[in-house]
Amino acid sequence: MTQGTDGVDGLVRKRIRALRAARGWSLDDLAARCHLSPSTLSRIETGHRRIALDQLTAIARALGTSLDQLVETVADDVVTNPTHDATRGLTLWALRGEPGVTVARMRLTGPPPEGLAGLRAHPGREWFTVLSGTVELLLGERRLRIEQGQAAEFPTMLPHAVGALGGPAELLGIFDREARRSHLRERASDR
């Protein structure tokens, strides 16, 4: 008897097979890592066996993922609209990522602020890569030029600010939970 191959059940089975194949693992390789027999895994992937929670937990762990990620369904809200802050020369698209982490694509049109008063410091870490143009990162008393294709990562307890150099620039940034909280507060207080 074949178990569900549609809906969440079918999606989980496809994900298990896809993750195993992406790692280049045979059924034997995954079986050894999750302590199940290759035939059990084959029957799970093909829908000829129910997936027990303890088996799913072991499979997820062996594949380096979580139960949440294995059973996650497609989000209804896959399209996002940008927000634009003309006074800061910033357009932001929020992307979905790991819980507690914000990924944002930003378009900068203005230079970084002048003077130490424009620099911000807060707990956390930030990482960004320049997609186009050139970005100037003010980090404490340092001025760093980050070109297209380069990336910067720094602890955000250092006073910092970013801006475009010589024309618009786009960057993709990743902010941890603490950095995200600070930036959301700044954006709300700027309005």
Image (cartoon, rainbow, N blue to C red):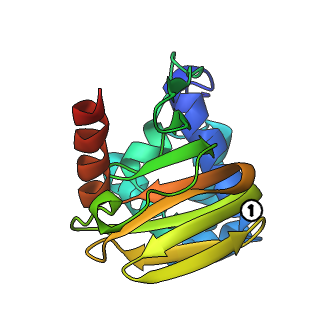
Can residue 35 be seen at all in this image of the molecule? no
Q: Quadrant of the N terminus?
A: top right
Q: Which residue lies at the image location 64% right of the left edge and 72% below the top edge?
A: 151
Task: Give the percent coordinates (x, y) of residue 144.
Answer: 58, 78
Residue under the point 22% across and 34% down: 189
Q: Residue sitting at 38 percent across and 53 percent down?
A: 101
In the image, taking residue 56 as reference, residue 83 lies left or right, namely: right
- Horizontal and vertical percent position of residue 183: 31, 48
Q: Is residue 141 left or right of residue 112?
A: left
Q: Splitting the image into 4 quarters, where does residue 146 fall?
A: bottom right
Identify which residue, 144 or 175, lies in the foreground. 144
Q: Residue furthest bottom?
A: 142
Callout 1: SS: helix
Quadrant of the image occupied by residue 4: top right
Q: Tag 1: Cα neighbours inside 10 Å, few (<14), some, or many (≥20)?
A: few
Q: Position of residue 14 (x, y in %)?
A: 66, 41
Between residue 44 and residue 105, name the one nearer to us: 105
Image quadrant holding the C terminus, namely top left
Left or right of 75, for residue 56: left
- Nearest the viewer among 127 and 43 is 127
Residue at point 38% right, 44% down?
Answer: 68
What is the x, y in percent for residue 46?
Answer: 68, 40
Three-letter code, disc 1: Ala
Q: Is residue 15 above or below residue 74?
A: below
Q: List the residue tagged with mark 1.
A: 22
The tally of labels here is 1
Outermost residue to the top: 76
Q: Is residue 87 visible?
A: yes
